[in-house]
Image (cartoon, rainbow, N blue to C red):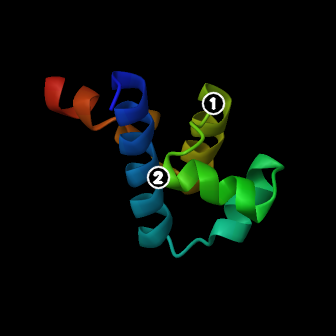
Amino acid sequence: MSYRNATARQVADEVRAALARNRKRQRELGALLGVSQQAAGRRLSGDQPFTVAEVSAVADWLDVPVASFFPESREAS
């Protein structure tokens, strides 16, 4: 697995966990991002990476820091 794919999956894992903690659904994520539920699912599985703008929008929506979606950056600090 390439670094890019690994990072996309790590971000997806963290977003998925944050959604669960906040009791948000994939459908709601799709609506926030302006994409279908299926497209939101591809992002949550890591098959399609989140864009920077999408990560920022999700962080704002869930009221969490953007860095919380990047486990490596949390470990480095």
Return the residue nearer the eye: 1 or 63. 1
Residue occupied by mark 1: 51
What is the distance, in whole Å, between disc 2 and disc 1 at their CAs?
Answer: 13 Å
> Residue 60 location, x and y as percent?
60, 44
Q: Is residue 51 left or right of residue 47?
A: right
Assess disc 1: are there few (<14), some (14-19) or many (≥20) residues with their C-alpha within 10 Å of its C-alpha.
Answer: few
**N-terminal of the two: label 2 or label 1?**
2
Quadrant where the C terminus is found in the figure: top left
Q: Which mark is residue 36?
A: none
Residue occupied by mark 2: 15
Q: Residue at x 64, y 67 (%)?
A: 26
Q: Is residue 77 visible?
A: no
Assess disc 2: are there few (<14), some (14-19) or many (≥20) residues with their C-alpha within 10 Å of its C-alpha.
Answer: many
Q: Residue at x 39, y 62 (%)?
A: 17
In this rendering, is residue 16 above or below 14? Answer: below
Return the residue nearer the eye: 36 or 52. 36
- Please name the amino acid that badge 2 sits on: Val
> Residue 38 location, x and y as percent?
73, 61
